[in-house]
Amino acid sequence: MGWRDDWPSMPDADGKPYDGMNLMQLTLNGKSPFAGVWDVRQLIREIEDKLNTRVADIPFVDKGSNNYGFHLQTSDSRELVARLARGDVNMPGFDGFPIEVQASEARFETAVYNLLQSEPLIQSSRLLYSRVPVQHPGPKFTIPQDLSGRRLFVFEKSEGATNVWTQLSSDHKLLLLGQLASMRAALFRYNPPHDLAAEHLLERLFEFMPPSLTMPVAPTREFWMHVLEAKIEATIRGEGEMIGWEDDNETVGPAALAAKQSLLRAIPYLLPVDDSPEQSLYRLVIEHGDFGIHNTTTTIQASGEPLVTSLFDFETACVWPALLSDPLVAASPVDLIVDEDGRPSVTRLPAEATQADLETYAGWANHYVQRLYHEAPGYEAAVRAGKDFRKLWFALRDWRGGNSEEFFSALGMWAENLRTNNGRPGGAHPPC
């Protein structure tokens, strides 16, 4: 199976890909495109049982990288969206994320949706039901007869659609970006409860992460110095030990080992001293992880103006300090970001972009970032103060393995230069 199902073909259509339409009728007629892999009727029964309703129709099905998305209509006139994992941990040959990772992700995402329901400015989708996947004991030789090995989320369907961006005029695109900036600012201002961070912070760190932390979770410079040290130790272990992923077939070499020591020595210089309690650099925030137009729904009002109605897909969300908060917003065909000094910038530029296109994208970035900074005081200062911490953190996050000697050697030289050129630990980039 691998780590997810293949998208099915249309029944009786000579291999033509399924168009996502009429799933309910196809299933009732015994022609479900998913037959032989999983049973649509089981999904319907579970939703009906948990939400005390009856599914009347499934007008459309689509797929993302990890999940199926179902638009459902109920007999009591409700519109629902169900998200079912495309990978089943009980399937023979399954080699996706292990059950421990999937279960913790599902629990964290559920907690985030439940918390954000009381935050109208963030407009997170309303979660009605969720469950974690369950792995049955013993060898896996046959296709599962139930859906328990797939995580499931069911939401109230928000008004609007996810694909309106290309239909908007230039002015309306700016209006939509302004709304996204307001939503992103509200998420930055939100203070999650300490219990959420204490329970989930470590498990939501990207690979490679330590098995445990020896300091309790706290919104302090000292705690994040400890986290960074633990992450460096977990990423670059002892000489001759594995580094990266198993498929890389690499071990820690002398250059990576030397870089490890350089990075550890540089930690006090990477994290600025927090001298602004009102806009704490180390205040914990919820990071969405995949913020963009593709993970929102938008309706078009009678005036023709767009209105964002929901933010969803917190599947890759995490908790970390304000100075690591990433303002990136995906806006087709580019990502709007800030550079290391907090200035608007653009990445993922199309190769065929014209000068006019570049000016348009720059205008989008300026509009989005100015609105974000206006509504989230302290965001720009946090980005600028954390520039060195962010550089290392995001470099470690974005590393995909391979060429470990070259990759970490370059990071090690950067760390040594940073330590040599800065006069005192924590004082290189004080808050603005």
Image (cartoon, rainbow, N blue to C red):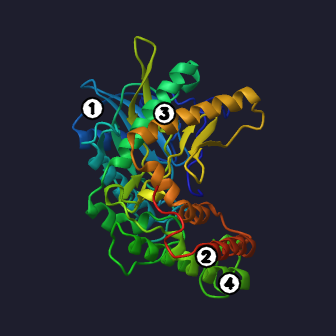
The residue that mark 1 highlights is 54
* Mark 2 to mark 4 CA distance (whole Å): 15 Å
Tell me which numbered mark, 4 or 1, is placed earlier along the sequence. 1
Q: Residues within 10 Å of mark 4 (few under 14, many from 20)?
A: some
Tell me if label 2 and label 1 are in contact, CB under 8 Å: no
* Mark 4 to mark 1 CA distance (whole Å): 62 Å
* Disc 3 residue type (three-letter): Val
Kindly state the secondary structure of the residue where label 2 is placed.
helix
The mark lying in front, picked from 4 and 3, is 4
* Mark 2 to mark 1 CA distance (whole Å): 64 Å
Tell me if label 2 and label 4 are in contact, CB under 8 Å: no
Tell me which numbered mark, 2 or 4, is placed earlier along the sequence. 4
Is 338 located above or below residue 156 in the figure? below
- At 27% from the left edge and 25% from the top edge, which residue is drawn? 75
The residue that mark 2 highlights is 419
* Disc 1 residue type (three-letter): Arg
Is 36 located above or below residue 322 in the figure? above
The mark lying in front, picked from 3 and 2, is 2
The residue that mark 4 highlights is 258
